[in-house]
Image (cartoon, helix red, strand yellow):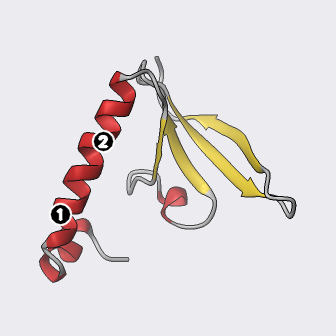
Amino acid sequence: MKTLEEIYAEDPTQRIIDEGADFGAKEMLRAGLPIYYRDEAYPETMKGNFFVKEYPNGAKFLIHKELTSDFRLLEEQVKLLNEQ
């Protein structure tokens, strides 16, 4: 798996995209909305249906998301990733 620095070296515009996404995520948290993302610190989130869900209060959970055949999005909280 490539590191972010390797990705940025191959495609410098990716860093700009990521910085914009970071700004948007911070604004969503500031507005009181949770955000979802993948994080290299949690390898299980780097592929498949696992994500980090972060709440405005800083609580982070490992989440499993699944799209059903009738297009409902199911979300299962797997575990707490930090203490709040």
65 relative to 36 in the view: left or right:
right
Q: Residue furthest right?
A: 70
66 relative to 53 in the view: left or right:
right
Write the residue at 86% across / 64% down. Answer: 69
Q: Residues within 10 Å of mark 1 (few under 14, many from 20)?
A: some
Residue 4 spot, x, y in % from top left:
24, 67
Residue that numbered label 2 is attached to: 24
> Which circle's residue, 1 or 2, is located before the other in the chain?
1
84 relative to 23 in the view: left or right:
right
Residue 10 spot, x, y in % from top left:
17, 82
Tell me which corner region of the image, top left, top right, bottom left or bottom right, holds residue 70.
bottom right
Tell me which corner region of the image, top left, top right, bottom left or bottom right, holds residue 14.
bottom left
How far apart, in angstroms, are the residues tagged by discs 1 and 2?
Answer: 14 Å
- The circle drawn on residue 47 is none
Write the residue at 16% across / 71% down. Answer: 13
Residue that numbered label 1 is attached to: 15
Q: Amino acid at mark 1?
A: Arg
Secondary structure beneath disc 1? helix
Write the residue at 48% across / 21% down. Answer: 83
Q: Amino acid at mark 2?
A: Gly
Q: Residues within 10 Å of mark 2 (few under 14, many from 20)?
A: few
